[in-house]
Amino acid sequence: MEETLRQSLLSIVGPESFSEDPEDIVSYARDLWPRTTILARGGTYTSYSSEAILWPKDASQLSRILKLCNEHNLPFVPFGAGSGVCGGTVAIRGGLCIDTKRMNRVLWFDKERGLARVECGINGQILEETLNRNQLTLGHFPSSIYCSTLGGFLAARSAGQLSTKFGKMEDMVSSAEVVLPDGSVVEVGQERPDLLQALVGAEGTLGFFTQATLRVHPLAEERLLRGIKFTDVATGARAIREILHAGIRPAVVRLYDELDTWMALAGGKKEGEPHEKNQILEAIKQRVPQDRLMRAAFSFALQLAPKAGVVADLGPRLLGAGCLLILAFEGKKRLVQAEELAALDIAARLGGKDLGRSPGEAWLQKRYAVSYRLSKVFDAGAFADTMEIAITWNRLMPLYDAVRKALQDEAVVMAHFSHAYHEGCSIYFTFSSSAPDEASSLERYDRIWKRALDAALAVGASTSHHHGIGLLKAQHLRRELGTGGALLDALKHGFDEKQLSNPGKLGFTRTD
Ligand SMILES: Cc1cc2nc3c(=O)[nH]c(=O)nc-3n(C[C@H](O)[C@H](O)[C@H](O)COP(=O)(O)OP(=O)(O)OC[C@H]3O[C@@H](n4cnc5c(N)ncnc54)[C@H](O)[C@@H]3O)c2cc1C
């Protein structure tokens, strides 16, 4: 970096908030995109890195940094906590990595208006705990809540586990302070037409969120959890649709397919049961003989379900596991009780078996844990990833079948249906696979994603429901948008003529 530029940046943020330390540069060179984890595992991930990391403390410092970047034609990447799983923070053209975590205060909350003003680098769990101490909740509970920021949620249109009641991030934000790529600071969300919704989900390509006004709610008086088992996933999905169409609004809706049901029930087993690894392996082998693929599944299954009594009867369970639906209702006690009864009536009419409260309570206890166990799959030499896509009810089962069919020779696939709406639902596929070495792992990883997204788009699904696009899904987003892609490019041109803000994401490519 030119010395004059370095000195100017240092004069804005101070030496404690500027780093060219190689350890920082390497740490910030990737997020949790599994493709970069495969590379990092082999020790070869060095392709893309920033020239310096900066931690501005407010919009004014950030504005001055971005103005300098424009003068020097230097790209910059917004960085929240790096928990994104699509390569949204990967610096493909170098430049500055700008970490927002020093902007981390709850500025005010107002119970009468049901609003809170918050700085966008705040960690999700700290935000929720701060609100809870004041008898409030945001209602946003992504599995990554411990390791992600409000800015990242806004940038990716994040969804939490209670999305059916509280909505996604775009529903939770009322207005926001944004530093645009040219350094100007604006407040969006109060005007017509509403620019806020164009920026939410733009993944830092159109500006930085520095503060947001969020809709907050009183803490629930009562929470009731329920497990219901259906014979198959189609009937479970129909139950969810009928529950929503009846005007019932559960806080949590999670329907697991057979394999995922087995995993979920496994997670609910008691401590202290013997770990009968051989029985597990035998049971899986008998069911699916494809050797290499199953090695990935073994490690996956073993990490996710280390309690063994579970797995001794894996074969029968898998064959007749059924599909577990977890519902949670929360809010005013009398309302919640009535909603639960009405939902159970619908489920019973469709043949659902009431399993009582324990499956839901077991899920609640470990609700964040399962995602973090995926890293053990990588330790075991395999890889895993998740794909979350949404579609209308009439095409939900064709989507489920199409993606599983597309991956049948490539990966072990399981799925759950966890964000449900009046008109449709999202499916969250988890796939696990392996290959003998890094190069063939990457090849297989890329092929899996291409096949899965090709199949999804062919049925009419969205490219992403809540993880965002990043680098991973850029080409498929462009296919999904069709002629709308030109409109997005025009927006980019208007906001960021020099294409400096988070290059390459959402499929923006430089034209010069
Ligand atoms: C174990 C695990 C579980 C997960 N579970 C969920 C889940 O349940 N629901 C869910 O929605 N996601 C989930 N994710 C994905 C991820 O946590 C979300 O995408 C989250 O919104 C990213 O937040 P972050 O602060 O880590 O953002 P980062 O990863 O740092 O950045 C994500 C994108 O946002 C941009 N960005 C970051 N901050 C700003 C800002 N202030 N202004 C503008 N752009 C910005 C970045 O440039 C990047 O493009 C999970 C990830 C993991 C690893």
Image (cartoon, helix red, strand yellow):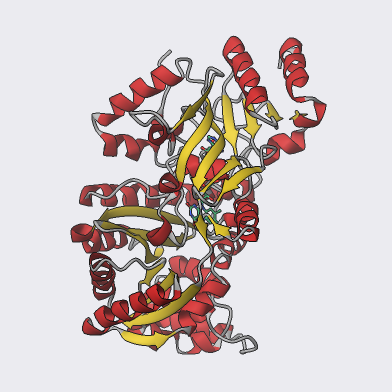
Q: Position of residue 260 (x, y in %)?
A: 42, 72
Quadrant where the N terminus sits is top right
Residue pictured at 63% horizontal, 30% vertical: 97
Q: Position of residue 127 (x, y in %)?
A: 62, 51
Residue depicted at 44% across the width and 38% down the height: 200
Q: Position of residue 351 (x, y in %)?
A: 24, 85
Look at the image and tell me in which quarter the C terminus lies.
top left
Residue 135, quarter of the rendered image? bottom right
Identify the residue at the far left of this view.
394
Number of numbered discs on residues: 0
**Residue 267 or residue 220, whichever sits in front:** 220
Q: Residue at x 54, y 89 (%)?
A: 309
Residue 56 in the image: above or below residue 151? above
Examine the rendering and report whether any part of residue 435 can be seen. Answer: no
Q: Nearer the viewer, residue 167 or 228?
A: 167
Query: Which residue ends up furthest to the right in the rendered image?
Result: 15
Identify whether 377 is placed above or below 262: above
Q: Is residue 264 left or right of residue 373?
A: left
- Comparing 139 with 277, the one in front is 139
On the image, the x and y values in percent for residue 498 come to 48, 15
Q: In the displayed structure, does residue 307 sit left or right of residue 422?
A: right
Q: Is residue 116 above or below residue 67?
A: below
Using the rendered image of the protein, determine whether residue 31 is visible from the camera's viewpoint: yes
